[in-house]
Amino acid sequence: MSHSASSPSFGTPSRPGAPGASGRAASWGSGPRGAGSRGAGRGAKPRFGFGLVGPRRDRHSVPVDQLEALALPVGDDGMVIGVDAESRPAVLGINRPVPYDVTLIGGLWTAQVLALRAAATGARVAVETGRAQAWTALAQAAGGGQPCISLHDVGRVPPQGASAGSPVVVIRDCGMRPPRGRVVSAPWQSVVTLLPYLSPVAPRLLEKSSLVGVQRVSPDEAAQIGRIMSLPRHEYEALSTLADGVTLWCTPSDRQFVMTQGTDAETGLLGGARRMD
């Protein structure tokens, strides 16, 4: 995600070079049976390692002022959680080698989209919830039959054994006053806590979180969140007017409004974006 009301940490692997290719080319023309010696006519100067001169074509070139058109809208590694105000992908790196806590004050729909997209990155998702019926269809549909999303009663999440090869995202959907979890954030194990509204435990959760997401709340709640997160007045006042699917994601130093839109598959399973459950 870009920053300005900007992305919290919201890669393209380097391509190996091709020494093998150049090595093969050199070997093809280096011996008596090489392409350069074999293909060169009598009197022609052999082109060792390159074979015969091929057809000439125009070089592929782009004027400098058009280079930006070739840019790819790719940010950091992670899952796409929506688009920013300029319709650029907003990417959240949820699988990390350090403990990572996220608090979302928002709707179940957004939390479930995050669960599906985290599973799509290869993470195992453990949902701690007091309303399993709201998650059952999603857990059954995710992973094409593979058990990538598991449901657990509140306080009954077993150790997950997270590792770099098998990262875990724990989603805590435990109501307004979630109890302290038995399973906490750890390397390669992120914890996302969903709060439907600002509650008495929210200030503690917001202060300890690496990332906070806020959807539409009342003006009074918006002002309180603004104080806790040190938001500019125009940003916290906007929190009471946000459309369904819009979230302000923020850290102590970065903020960005993001619109999350469901894919066809997500919409078919979860319905359209909504703030209220």
Image (spheres, rainbow, N blue to C red):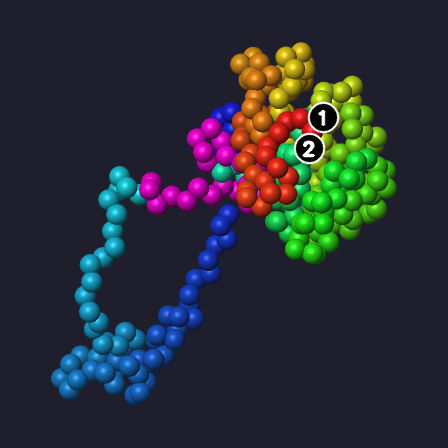
Which residues make up the magenta segment?
Answer: 68-88
Pick the front one: 8 or 112: 112
The answer to whether the residues at label 2 and label 1 have Cβ atoms under 8 Å apart is yes
Q: Locate residue 118 relative to residue 157 in the image: left or right.
A: left
Q: Position of residue 166 (x, y in %)?
A: 70, 53
Q: Locate residue 129 relative to residue 214 in the image: left or right.
A: right
Q: In the rendered image of this protein, does residue 42 appear above or below residue 86?
A: below
Label 1 is placed on what type of residue?
Pro
* Magenta stretch holds residue 20: no
Pick the front one: 101 or 244: 244
Classify residue 196 by image quadrant.
Answer: top right
Q: Residue furthest left?
A: 43
Label 2 is placed on what type of residue?
Leu
Crowding at mark 2 (Cα within 10 Å: few <14, some 14-19, many 20+): many
Classify residue 229 by image quadrant.
Answer: top right
Which residue in the protein does label 1 denote?
196
Which residue in the protein does label 2 denote?
108
Q: In the rendered image of this protein, does residue 223 appear above or below residue 139?
A: above
Pick the front one: 200 or 22: 200
Crowding at mark 1 (Cα within 10 Å: few <14, some 14-19, many 20+): many
